[in-house]
Image (tube, rainbow, N blue to C red):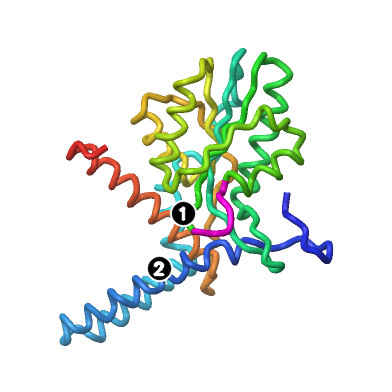
Amino acid sequence: MQPPRRDGKPVDLSRNTYVTAFKLILFTLLTLFFAAIVLWKRARRSLIVCMIALFWLLAAGWLTAPLLDLAQPHRQSAAPAAFAPRTAIILLGGGTIYDDDDVLVPPRDVLSRIEVSARSYAACKRTATTCQVIVSGGNPQRHSATEADTYLPYLLRQQIPRTDIVLESTSRTTYENARNVSAIVGNSRYDTVILVTSAYQMPRALLDFHRFGITPQPLISSARHARLGVLPRYDNLVAAEIALHELIGIAQFHVYRAFGWF
C-alpha cells in the first residue's frame, strides 16, 4: 500500500517519516555530551570516547536491537483475530507526513496498520453481523488534516464502506486514543474489540486501553528490526528513538498511575 507519486513511482516514506525523531536523538546525545564536558572537565577524553561508542552502538544496531526487544516483546500477533457478532476494529493513528508532491499521506508503518485493518474487516464480514473500523487520530503535528481524515481514503480504497468507518479525530496521544475510543466503544454494544497497531506501540496502547476498562485483542501490523553491522545506519537511529520513546512512555504510565494522575 505504498502511495504512488504523480509520476507513478512509489514514494519511499520511511526516511521522511522520522526526520524529527532522528534530530531528537542526535540533539539529546550532543546535549548530554556537552553537559558532561562542562561538568567533568578532567574526564573529557573518556567522555568523548564513551559518547562516540554509544552513538556507534545505536547506529550500528548493537544497542538498538536489545532496545527493540524490550519495546516489542511480541513482534507478531499470538493468534488470529477472533470475531464476534458485533466487532469493532480499532486502528491507531501514527502521524502523517508530506510526500515529495507535498500531499499529506500516512507514514509507512500506518500503511501497514491500514492494510491489516482492511484484511481484518474483510474476514470479519464473512462471519460477523456487524463490523466497524474505528480510526483514532487527531492532529498533534498541526498538519493540514487530522490523521483520521488522512487515513479515510485509504480505507475506502480497500472496499470498506463509509458507513462502517467511525472517525475519532481529536486524540493527540496514545492515552487520548484509548480515552476517546473507550467512550465510543462504551456507547455501542460491541461483543469484541480488536486493536491494530505496530508492535512497538502495542504494549503501551494496551496499558492505556486497560486503564479505561477496554481489553482488546492485540493485532500487530508490523515490527521494527535493527540491522546489525559495522557501518552506522540512519534507520537504526530511527528505531532506537522509537524504542526509547515507547519505553519511556511505559515508565511514565506506571509513575503517573502510582501518583494517581492516570
Q: Position of residue 45 (x, y in %)?
A: 26, 86
Q: Position of residue 70 (x, y in %)?
A: 40, 47
**Location of residue 237 with respect to 242 vertically, above or below:** below
Q: Position of residue 126 (x, y in %)?
A: 73, 18
> Which quadrant of the view contains residue 227?
bottom right
**Location of residue 49 with respect to 148 vertically, above or below:** below
Q: Position of residue 106 (x, y in %)?
A: 62, 53
Determine if the magenta segment contains residue 196. Answer: no
User: Which residue is under mark 2?
Assistant: 25
Left or right: residue 162 compared with residue 185: right
User: Which residue is under mark 1?
Assistant: 140
> Which image quadrant: the C terminus?
top left
- Between 26 and 105, the residue placed more toward the observer is 105
**Which residue range is magenta in the image?**
142-147
> Which quadrant of the view contains residue 105?
bottom right
Name the amino acid type tagged 2: Ile
Left or right: residue 216 compared with residue 80: left
Picture mark count = 2
- Between 61 and 192, the residue placed more toward the observer is 192
Name the amino acid type tagged 1: Pro
Left or right: residue 75 compared with residue 2: left
Residue drawn where x is 23% and y is 85% of the image:
44
- Between 244 and 209, the residue placed more toward the observer is 209
